[in-house]
Image: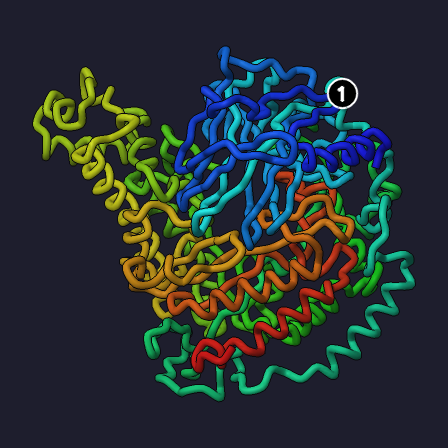
Amino acid sequence: MGDVLVAACAFLGTLAATGSAVAPDETAVELFDAAALPTNLVQNSATASLAPVGAGHGLRVEFQKADWPNVYFKAPHGVWDWTEYLGIAVDIQNPGTEPVDVCCRVDNEGADGMKACNTGKTTIRPGETQTFSTYFNVASGKSERFWGMRGVPGKVMRSSGPPLDRAKIVAFQYFLPTPQHPQVLVLSNIRVFGKGKALEEIEKLPFVDKYGQYNGADWPGKLKSAHDFKKWSKAEKAALDTTPALAGRDSYGGWADGPTLEATGWFRSQQVNGKWWLVTPDGHLFFSAGMDCVGTSDSTFITGRDGWFASIPKETSKNKALFGQVDGVHSMAEAIDGKGKIFNFYKANLERKYGKDWAAKWRETTVARLQAWGFNTIANWSQQDVADVGKMPFTATAGIGGNFRRVEGGSGYWGRMSDPFDPSFLIAAESSLAPVTEKYGKNPMCIGYFVDNELSWGSANGHAIAEWVLNSPPDQPCRAALVARLKERYPAISDVNRVWATNAPDWDALRAPGNPNAACAKDLDEFIYLFARRYFDTVNAALKRHAPHQLYLGCRFAGPPCKMVTRACAEVADIVSFNLYQRAINAADWTGPNDLGKPLIIGEFHFGALDRGMFHPGLVETKDQNERAASYKLYVESVVDCPAFVGCHWFQYVDEPITGRYFDGENYNIGFVTVVDQPYPEMVSKAKEAHAATYARRYLGTK
């Protein structure tokens, strides 16, 4: 770490005691030293009040249980000009008894959470006061030294989002991402920092060694020499050979010592004593403990990164599989003109470890590891050859692709939502699902099919789908369907305007109002339900035509969408799937009045830390590997204890490349193994504990 950053971090660490000091390279934005709340403060699902902090003052904020509760600060004179600064910082105290995830968003005009804004995230632990620094994304392309990385050397979390115009900052906010219950934080000393400095001062080059590891630090499990591969491999093989299989399991990983139900020859679901379960083909209860992305595919760009790497082998006919050429990567296009060479450090290390037959030996070792660790499912995004080994149940993956319309008036992280009213969508569903069901439709080891992933359904509260539909061109099939439905209820556009309190001159100009009244909200909700039913019915019908005995596992919601969408999914899919990146599952959110009437499964969750040479902790941060492992066990136990869920799948098997995966720059510490194929012993230990106790805990209530 460079001397400049060390000095800055040391100074920032003293601020918690003062509550108001600013460094020479900083400028105060809000010190909360007035007698009243700032006039430019807006409270959204949050209640703020002034509070003493050390020798200064702060803002005590109670964030409510809501999607994005926040305190929002508008630029008093239209814009702030922060051109000379690296980012914005705040001191945050957590007086509570549990960790709190908090985000900062900095906006240009037109910000919507994805465009025209930057968002940073951190975790404030119980009783901790932390300086939370959000670094602006100010450049793209080769002019930015550490391009293509979510976290950079020096434990600096780069904000997500496009390059920001620092001369035209219109607002910033501090928000909590969907807290499970109210949380209190105390904010103080908001300032912009790094005047006249550059992020590029952080690290000297090269900072990546020949094995794809950070060369600026040391830690347990770091590979020092190629000789370590043989030593580690021999020790692990001996351990795996002597590790007994989990007791009382059938050949699918189901609970052989538990009750025996009807054996249909296929995986299915059933409620037993008020709790949902999967049932193995042999009729035994099954809780799916899965591992996502069991594979070797994560590569990173080497083009445009001269000097980053201590050693990259020369590409030859013998090592060609380690390299790749990418054209038109959307999030990296500006950095390398949309083209570049990529390299796979993990594959290179597997070749060093296992020799020329590395793929088969890796596959054999990996399956043995997963079974020894108590996993019983090879989950989404995993390599086909791992599932084809035939020793573990697996979930199949499919995506609906093809030449059909997307909702053109919408947006989304991975892209716009599919338009299920387009006749071409039905054709695409058939052609997309046929190949994967042809391969796995007769395989009883296949639990079922996840179809699509983290689609753009909008947030849990709101009417995003209907708004996007009405923002689309008149010839958009889903818009035409919505307008036709409205015309059945309202003969003229004037009738819609009267009921909705809008003023559209004609049907083509009709848009959803920003704050719909009750009648308008009812119309929008009804269409959102029909839109979702159209999507799920189309997918389910195509899937069941080709694989009638296997389960439709849903579309892996990126957190809960609005109730109309989850209701539609639950009415159609065999299992409803969610990717839930949070610290634990609150059973009350999924049972009682929130019960969907179908079993649920978690498609993704993870935790990460920064104590083993990685630059980003992922979506849920922990202090170190011990806390990461403990968090895994706690999360799994919370899912096991919730009657609605039938499994949870960890994302992912291997850490992402420290210089970022090539298509979006993620470089998270989220693996059970490192880039040098070394398992994290803390994670393995806690996984074994959690998995060994799963069936007794869930069925018998043993804890």
240 is higher (above) or lower (below) than 643: below
Identify the residue position indicated by label 1 in the image: 24
Q: Locate the N terminus by quadrant.
A: top right
Q: Give the residue at x 37% y 60%.
A: 588
Quarter of image, res 156: top right
On the image, the x and y values in percent for residue 506 come to 18, 18
Q: Give the residue at x 38% y 38%.
A: 404
Nearer to me, 90 or 336? 90
Nearer to me, 93 or 569? 93
Q: Give the amino acid type for the residue marked by disc 1 in the picture.
A: Pro
Give the total of numbered labels: 1
On the image, the x and y values in percent for residue 174 come to 52, 34
Query: Is any part of residue 458 visible from this angle?
Result: yes
Q: Give the residue at x 70% y 71%.
A: 364
Q: Give the residue at x 61% y 46%.
A: 124
On the image, the x and y values in percent for residue 268 come to 38, 73
On the image, the x and y values in percent for residue 190 come to 61, 27
Residue extending farthest left:
491
Q: Residues within 10 Å of mark 1 (few under 14, many from 20)?
A: few
